[in-house]
């Protein structure tokens, strides 16, 4: 039986439209990523940028107009290095927290989980149901700003999680020719099925 209780929308404060605010949001993500990775490099801790920022880096190598902005800063490290990671990141102003079982470092004591460094642990499954574990930090390439997971590792991790945003990132890579059907034989069966699904029906 459907409830007759009315649901009232939550009031949202709308600020003025602002290009500056949009640009500042992108710059804040970049600054946070640079500060974190510089601290890891200074401490000699192996790492690799993953997630949406890694996708953006690979996409920008083909067409910068296709880059999607992301607020997430996902960094791949080894769990055995967590104490050293903690010391390095806290040394540049981050504060360790755990949000929805994810180890992260928020930007200062008053920071938000939206403005955090999220850790992925190399060689571990993010969820038990994932076909494969994450990549190792050795599966990385050196870029201008920081180390980034290889394209192969990035595609595996995106096919592993396969959430809507992961599918969108994979579709971007497909549309630019970074990946295509020639990748299918090198993938585990479940990943191959997922990639074929996107190739066959890119509009979902």
Image (tube, grey):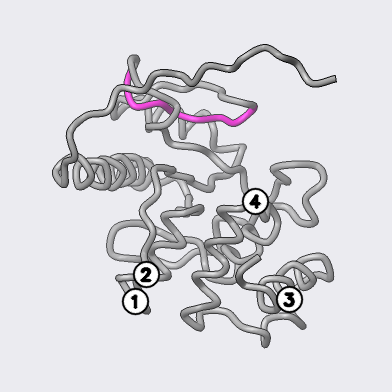
| Label 1 SS | loop
Badge number at residue 196: 3
Question: Nearest the camera: 48 or 154?
Answer: 154
* Quarter residue 25 falls in: top left
Quarter occupied by the C terminus: bottom right
Quarter occupied by the N terminus: top right
Which residue carries the number 1 mark?
A: 63
Measured along the vertical axis of the image, is residue 135 above or below residue 17? Answer: below
| Residue 102 on the magenta segment | yes
Which residue carries the number 2 mark?
A: 66
Q: Position of residue 192 (x, y in %)?
A: 77, 73
- On the picture, is 42 further left or further right than 70? left
Alpha carbon distance from label 3 to label 1: 23 Å
- On the picture, is 21 further left or further right than 76? left
Alpha carbon distance from label 4 to label 3: 16 Å
User: Is tag 4's residue or tag 2's residue first in the polypeptide sequence?
Assistant: 2
Mark 1–mark 2 CB contact (< 8 Å)? yes
- On the picture, is 173 further left or further right than 111? right
Mark 1–mark 4 CB contact (< 8 Å)? no
Alpha carbon distance from label 1 to label 2: 6 Å
Residue at 20% across / 42% down in the picture?
A: 24
Measured along the vertical axis of the image, is residue 85 above or below residue 41? Answer: above
* Quarter residue 63 falls in: bottom left
Mark 3–mark 1 CB contact (< 8 Å)? no
Which residue carries the number 4 mark?
A: 163
| Label 2 SS | helix
User: Is tag 1's residue or tag 4's residue first in the polypeptide sequence?
Assistant: 1
Highlighted range, magenta = 101-108
Measured along the vertical axis of the image, is residue 127 above or below residue 193? Answer: above
User: Is tag 4's residue or tag 3's residue first in the polypeptide sequence?
Assistant: 4
Residue at 28% across / 64% down in the picture?
A: 144
């Amino acid at each position: 039986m459907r409830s007759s209780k009315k649901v009232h929308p939550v009031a949202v404060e709308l600020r003025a439209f602002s290009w500056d605010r949009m640009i500042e949001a992108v710059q804040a993500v970049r600054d946070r990523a640079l500060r974190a990775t510089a601290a890891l490099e200074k401490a000699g801790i192996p790492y690799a940028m993953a997630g949406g920022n890694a996708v953006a880096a690979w996409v920008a190598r083909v067409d910068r107009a296709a880059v999607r902005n992301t607020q997430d800063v996902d960094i791949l490290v080894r769990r055995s290095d967590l104490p050293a990671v903690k010391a390095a990141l806290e040394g540049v102003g981050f504060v360790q927290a755990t949000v929805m079982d994810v180890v992260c470092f928020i930007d200062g004591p008053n920071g938000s989980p939206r403005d955090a460094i999220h850790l992925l642990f190399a060689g571990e499954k993010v969820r038990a149901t994932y076909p494969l574990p994450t990549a190792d930090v050795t599966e990385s390439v050196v870029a201008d700003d920081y180390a980034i997971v290889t394209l192969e590792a990035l595609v595996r991790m995106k096919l592993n999680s396969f959430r809507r945003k992961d599918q969108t990132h994979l579709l971007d890579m497909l549309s630019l020719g970074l990946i295509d059907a020639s990748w299918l034989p090198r993938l585990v069966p479940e990943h191959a099925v997922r990639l074929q699904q996107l190739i066959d029906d890119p509009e979902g």
